[in-house]
Amino acid sequence: MASNRLTPLAFKNLKPQDDEQTISDGGGLFIRVRSIADGGAITFRFCYRIDGKQRWKNLSAKTLTAARAERDSIKLQVKAGIDPMLEESLQKERQRQAQLAEQAELAKQQALITVRDLFERWAATDLQNRKDGGKEIRRMFEKDVLPIIGGLAVADVRKGHITEITDTLLLRGVNRMAKLILALVRQMFRFAVDRDIIEFDPTASIRKAKIGGKSVERDRILSEDEIRALYRQLPDANMMPSTECAIWIMLSTLCRVGELSKAKWEHIDFTAKTWLIPDEHSKNGKPHTIYLSDFALAQFKRLAEFRESDVWLFMDRTKTTHVCDKSISKQVNDRQTDRDLSNRSQHKDALRLTGGKWTPHDLRRTGATFMGNLGISPDVIEKCLNHTEQNKMKRVYQRQELKAEQAEAWRKLGERLEILTREHTGNVIVLKTSPR
């Protein structure tokens, strides 16, 4: 075979003819010279036998030296029992399968959305329909949820990730917030299940009762003695004057802290002595008119003395919108806490009362209870609270607004608060608490 090897000069002198030429180089290597009509190209082929069958394989080499090296490599494969033709087909198939797998993995990764992506989709679809457009829930998620799991793929979230969120909140001592956050996170993941983003809700096996203990309905009511104490303690609590007014307004009007934080001056009528809470600010979506007692009106007038805006009663720090719903509650909470508040620590006990910790919402409950003790009808109190009647039949047939009765209820409450907050209250008669 070696004698058939072409010299470099002989290879160089190969020229295309009218007919195709096949020249042996020995060792199974053949040089193929195309005819003039076919362009005269020179290619290389290798002839070998495997399993008793003769095979021809086209080589990729462009020079005679490279072709001989490629032939020798293929010979080693054949000697090892490997059919180079079959191996080439298998290699192409393996590459094809690897490419398909890579494409599938890429598509899978592209299909995997993060928890933050899911939150944005949930917010745009569901939360935007809430009164505040989902602002409060976004605030909670940005603070307590997304920093922990926002970067995770939704499909990778496990029960342990959720309990990490709730455990962090429990360590801060905000058990009710932990339960609320769990409920909201569960809503978001059920949203994902409904849209086939994930198959299973990672919060499904977490029992709400196990997060921070069993929920109990708050029934904290400030006593008349505590109202007197609150009146004495407020001036030394280092609170914003507007927050002091807010406390007395919530107690004397039975409004919610969120309704008060969004209040606008245009809805306060000092002549008619009324405050309109528009439907977009009320919890049940219905407008609510509060008839201001002299006690409540005095607080609004005090607010007007240092008003910072022509729009909002309570401005935020940016001076562009109303104060956050949580701001008033936080100021009250920080003055009856065991936490270290650094430079504010000297005021952290300023609003502690004998009956235990209280919240702005407890003022609403307290005012309603005082009304009951003053002999106001429960139906009128419910109207003052702007509660939605739970009984459907009553809701349909009993549509009287009881405006005069409500005005009288607020007047009596205001008079009682006026007595309790006078400088000398030692001889005040304590009203007997009636069961409600």
Image (cartoon, rainbow, N blue to C red):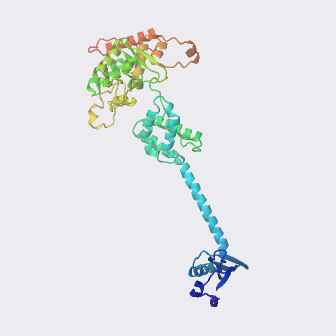
Depth check: give the residue in front, 368 or 287.
287
Q: Position of residue 304 (x, y in %)?
A: 30, 20
Q: Position of residue 346 (x, y in %)?
A: 26, 33
**Quadrant position of the N terminus in the picture:** bottom right
Total count of labels? 0
Depth check: give the residue in front, 310 or 184.
310
Q: Residue at x 49, y 30 (%)?
A: 130
Depth check: give the residue in front, 237 or 302.
302
Q: Residue most toward the right? A: 52
On screen, 113 above or below 58? above
Q: Residue at x 59, y 62 (%)?
A: 98
Q: Position of residue 376 (x, y in %)?
A: 44, 11
On screen, 376 above or below 24? above
Left or right position of 39 against 140: right
Residue 410 figure quarter: top left
The answer to whether residue 207 is visible is no
The answer to whether residue 2 is visible is yes
Left or right position of 47 against 191: right
Q: Residue at x 60, y 74 (%)?
A: 60
Left or right position of 320 against 6: left
Q: Position of residue 30 (x, y in %)?
A: 65, 81
